[in-house]
Structure formats: structure tokens, C-alpha cells
Image (cartoon, helix red, strand yellow):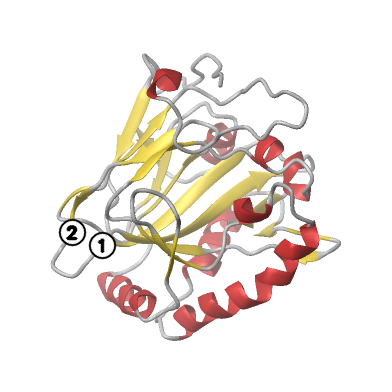
Amino acid sequence: MAATAPTWTTEGEHVLTQDNLRLLLDNRISVIRIPSFATPDECRSFTEAARAGNIKYYSVAKRIGYIGMAQFEYRWDRPKEDFFNAVPDAQRDLVDVIERCSFDPLQRLIDRLQAVWPHPVGVAREDLGAYYAGIVRFAGEGVDLHVDWAPINSPQYAIGRIDGQLGWNFFAEELLSGGETTVHNAPWDPQIAAGEIPKSYGLEPELVEGAPKAVYKASAGDVVLFNTRNPHEISGGTPKPGGSRISIGSFVGRMPDGELVLWS
């Protein structure tokens, strides 16, 4: 594994503007926060709807529940048709949550981005169909150090042509303590041998040793965006009674023509 030199030119969190969105895509700033993206009532509504959804679990050491699907499950050694054939079932699981909720976080996020971005914003698609976007996660135990960068992770897909990649999360329920996300400014640039599948989850701490970092709290009602080419991790914490760290999010990639496309 390898990382490139730090690229951030300023510290702290930033508001959503066209200039800041471009800077984040270019990995020149660390974090954009959209405060009060949803009301407390909307957060409660989404949390209740998510808990009643079709929750599955990843096969990783820290227990992570999810609703929907992630494209990384299909990115290696499987025909692309498998991914696109699985999208409708995942979409139904998400619609089931949204229909029992008082608002649609995914569409609201698209609308907020479109309000500041001069090019189209929408869910990614290619000849085989639309991608899935909007994965709900229950991550109270934390998430190990990992990185997401479609040009290396998914080179055979249309999203492999992006030149910048963000992750956004709307937080519907926060933990009593802990649950912070740490983003390390050590942009991922691995050396890959022919036919090799690069390791992108459970990365070694040495990869980010000495790199600048940004730590942000998952506050209910807010959306936070950061550049996912930077290795990032989530700490575990103490949940509210019966609760978890509940969020919904996706990736946002910038295509060569400036269009922003979303997928999970």
C-alpha cells in the first residue's frame, strides 16, 4: 500500500458552496458539514423506519448492519450484470424505509448539491442500468481503517472514470459518546500488480502514520461530506439504550464532464 503527500490547504469544517464542493473533490479541504439537514422529528422518523427495515450484516469483526447494497460486493471477479440485477431488490428495501419515513434523505441531498453545482447531479447509471445509491448503516461498534476510490476499486465500471470521490452521510441517530470519524490526509495511491486485488479495508495504521487528520462527530440531523480517497475510520462508542449510530449515505463522484454521480 502507498499514500501520497498531504494535500489539504486549510483546517476545520466548511459550509456547502460551489467553491468548497470543488475544493473537497480536489482534496484541498477536509470536511463539509450541512448542519440541520433534517429536523429532530425527521431524525426520529427515519430512525424508526430504518429499525423496521430489512437489516443485513457485513462479515467483518465489528458488527455493522445495513439496508440496501454496496457496489464493492460486485467489483471483482463477477460479471457486471450481477450487480445491476441485484439493484431492484435493494431499491425496494430502501423504498420500504423511505415510505415509512417523513422525508427522503437521498433526494434532499441531491437537491442540496444541485443547488450549488453547475452540472447535473443524480444517481449513476450506465448501459446496464442505474446504480444503487443510499445505503443505511448501523455502525455503533465502529468501522476499521479503509479507503474508497472507484478508479482502483471498480475500474471496469463507469464510475471508474471519476476524478474525485466523496462520501456523504446523514446521521439520524448519534451515540451517547464516541462514534467519531477520523479522516487521514494520506491519499491512497497503491502500487498494483497485474491481476492483483488491492486491499482497501482493514488497512495498516502505518499507512497514515504522521499524516494530518480531521476528526468529526456524527451529530444527529447533520450531513457530513469528505473525500474518501483519504483513509478513514470510525470509532466505536456507547449507544443510547437500544440505539446505535444510524446513518444513510453514498458516494459522490465527479465525472470528466463535471456531472456528479451517486452510488453506494
| Mark seen at residue 244 | 1
| Mark seen at residue 142 | none
- The image shows residue 105 at horizontal and vertical percentages of 47, 68
Label 2 and label 1: CA atoms lie apart by 5 Å
Task: Answer with left or right where residue 1 lies relative to residue 238.
Answer: right
Residue at image x 38%, y 16%? 209
Residue at image x 47%, y 37%? 146
Please, what is the three-letter code of the amino acid marked with disc 2? Answer: Pro
Please tell me in which quadrant of the rendered image residue 12 appears.
top left
Task: Answer with left or right where residue 133 lies relative to residue 205.
Answer: right
Residue at image x 67%, y 76%? 88
Please, what is the three-letter code of the amino acid marked with disc 1? Answer: Ser
The residue furthest right is 127
Please tell me in which quadrant of the rendered image residue 55 appears.
bottom left
| Mark seen at residue 239 | 2
> If the image is split into quadrants, where does the N terminus sit?
top right
